[in-house]
Amino acid sequence: MSESCKFKRYVWELPVRWCHWINVVSIITLAVTGLLIGKPYSFGSSASDFTMGWIRFVHFSVAYLFTVSLVSRVLWSLIGNEYAGWRAFFPFLTSKGREKMIKMLRYYMLVDKEVPETIGHNPLATTAYTALFAIYVLMILTGFSLYALHAPQGLMHKSLGFMYAMFSNQGMRLTHHFSMYLIFGFIVNHIYSAWLMDIKEHGSEISSMFSGYKFTVHNEKE
Amino acid sequence: MSRQKIEEESGLIEHGLETRDCSIGEILRQRGVSRRDFLKFCSAVTAAMALPASFAPQVAQALDEVKRPTLVWLEMQSCSGDTEALLRSANPTVAEIILDILSVDYHETIMAAAGHQAEEALDKTIADHKGNYICVIEGSISMKDGGVYGSTGGKSHLDRARQVCGGALATIAVGTCASYGGIAAAVPNPTGAVGVMEAVPGATVINLPGCPVNADNLTATIVHYLVFGKIPALDSHGRPLFAYGKRIHDNCERRPHFDAGQYVEHWGDDGHRKGFCLYKMGCKGPATFHNCPTQRYNEKTSWPIGAGHPCAGCSEPAFWDTMGPMYKRLPNVPGFGIEATADKIGVGLVAGAAAAFAVHGALNALRKDKEPSDETKEG
């Protein structure tokens, strides 16, 4: 139990929280519809139904939503506060960041017993987010490349020409399908770590993603 | 046409090459093809070129007037399936147009001449009509070890292709092998097989992939040249847009079943008998660009999906290596053994992560950690 009185600090700005929850909803929707597109269930009872049509419509619409959310988050990493900034996502580039990463790693490996406090992102987490971001980009590119096949010679098809040069069509499908499981693996890790830190840090880790506020050992104005 | 003129032209036909002075329309009349059949052919070929029906009279007029072009047909590493497809085109008018009316001066499989005589005919044709003849190539070209794995008349396929395609007005690569190397080029590609475009980089090549080529698309390509005086617009793989500009999936007669969610689950099940979508049986229609659904094969009789078999994607580059497996949606993950699907590996990965974190969580629950204090605070 905490002996000290903690200070409230505004960490996650509104666009950061919005992007986070839009991503959550998008990923769940995209995974469910995507699995049904990859291995459809015979829902249709008549040829006049449009079940697969709607499933694909939802998948493609939410894919656009997810892409917009991701692009917005990248822009916000140039505009937002230090916790949202792009520098936080490359902690391994600075010696201070590397030091924090090692401390965090030692704690996770059950070597150290003291939780290092992190006000913004945990440096190990942001490293994972950078990898995750690369998977997102891969998902968006392979997804839209497969989608663009409906309009050959169109703008999207032509601008994704480099993707068709790099991937075979089946390779693209496999990559798009398998990367979903990599994201699932990340989600397991992410939820567990948030839960663990919420318990260990007493810094309101989970609710901060709703309210934006965390609780820190010392005052921001100190 | 006067009786005298017909006799003159009949005489000319016997003199071989000189008959090129007659227009295609005149030759057709001599062969007893009725005007009605000719116009029917023109309408069909206009549709094959994806042109509006109003173009049919223009096509007829152009074919009436245009001089027949010289065409040589070379066999490389092939199964002659494309020749077979051409000879089996059931419509006599279409076959007539291609085989008789287009002056096929050299076609190894069907010509009467043999040996040195045949080789001389080829040399004479390409010398007399340099820059003006159309070359059709069937089969892939072996490039490995200087192209020693394939030869005709003592000359390697590569040398022949360079010699003949180099002087051609245009080269039409018929079938997937001539277009992209096809089955001969599949891993491990022992002969170093490639398509014409890769073997003769400077040549003007039109690819008509498919296994076999749809003879109607070949006719339409030649007619397009005769009518407009230029080769048709091509996509990034060198295929005419009129035949390969649309995806099979988007023109498929079974598409309503795809959108509805009605699929064949097993061979011969109720859905298969009712003609439902073959998507779950590994159909590559969503990734294949060809006009099969509209043009069909063998005088528009049928085509693979029409006959209840999923599309194999035969008209796509490197289809043998990259469009498989034929009866599954997704390939297996390379490097993980034969039955390692993405789903199995993925579920294993997620379950493994969950198990690892569960153990981590249990260990953490047993530990008494210090929460951040003044010593461990950040900032």
Image: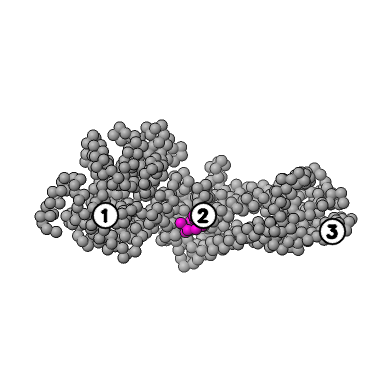
Q: Residue furthest left?
A: B4
* Span highlighted in magenta in the image: A149-160
Quadrant location of the N terminus of chain B in the rendered image: bottom left
Check residue B94 in the rendering and tell me which mark sits there, or answer none.
1
Residue position marked by numbered label 3 in the rendering: A221
Q: CA distance from mark 3 to mark 1?
A: 88 Å
The label nearer to you, 3 versus 1, is 3
The residue sitting at 64% across, 52% down in the picture is: A133
The subunit carrying tag 3 is: A
What's under tag 3, amino acid-wise? Lys
Question: How crowded is the residue under tag 1: few (<14 C-alpha within 10 Å), some, or many (20+)?
Answer: many
Which element is circle 1 on? helix
Residue under the image location 78 percent in, 61 percent down: A10
- What crowding class fits label 2: few (fewer than 14 Cα within 10 Å), some (14-19), or many (20 or more)? few
Report the disc number at residue A159.
Answer: 2
Q: Residue at x 81, y 49 (%)?
A: A115
User: Does the magenta-highlighted stretch encompass residue A152?
Assistant: yes
Residue B26 belongs to magenta span: no
